[in-house]
Amino acid sequence: MRPRERTRDEEVTALLAYGAFLHADHRGICGPGSGWVTLADPEGNLFCVLRSEAEL
């Protein structure tokens, strides 16, 4: 997913507060500001959070 109203990091923080679990953190994988975060919902379904359009 690509956030529309928040940054990637703000979206990750909000999703963790809603009950998602951190699966893998790939922020900075290709330098500062790059990468993504893989989260799992409470049922174990994985999804990625990418940088927002404004961050590209």
Image: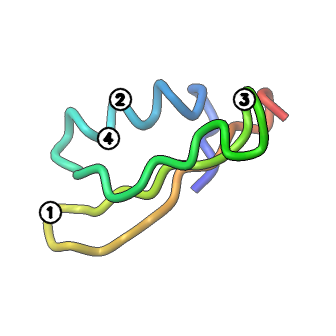
Location of the C terminus (image quadrant): top right
Residue at image mark 2: 13
Q: Residue at x 67, y 45 (%)?
A: 29
Q: Is residue 44 above or below residue 49?
A: below
Amino acid type of the residue tagged 1 in the rendering: Pro
Q: Which residue position is annotated with label 4?
A: 15
Separation (CA) of disc 3 from disc 1: 27 Å
Q: Which residue is outermost to the right?
A: 56
CA gap between label 4 and label 3 equals: 19 Å
Whether pointer 4 and pointer 2 mark residues with C-beta atoms closer than 8 Å, the reply is yes
Q: Between residue 6 and residue 49, name the one nearer to us.
A: 49
- The residue wearing badge 3 is 33
In what element is the residue under mark 4? helix
Q: Which amino acid is tagged 4?
A: Leu
Foreground residue among 44 and 24: 24
- Rendered residue at 46%/47% (across/down): 25
Q: Is residue 44 above or below residue 52?
A: below
Q: Residues within 10 Å of mark 3 (few under 14, many from 20)?
A: few
Residue 17 position by quadrant: top left
Q: Earlier in the sequence, mark 1 or mark 2?
A: 2
Which residue does the image show at 41% across and 37% down from the upper left?
12
Residue 6: horizontal and vertical position, in percent?
A: 57, 26
Q: Determine the secondary structure under disc 1.
A: loop
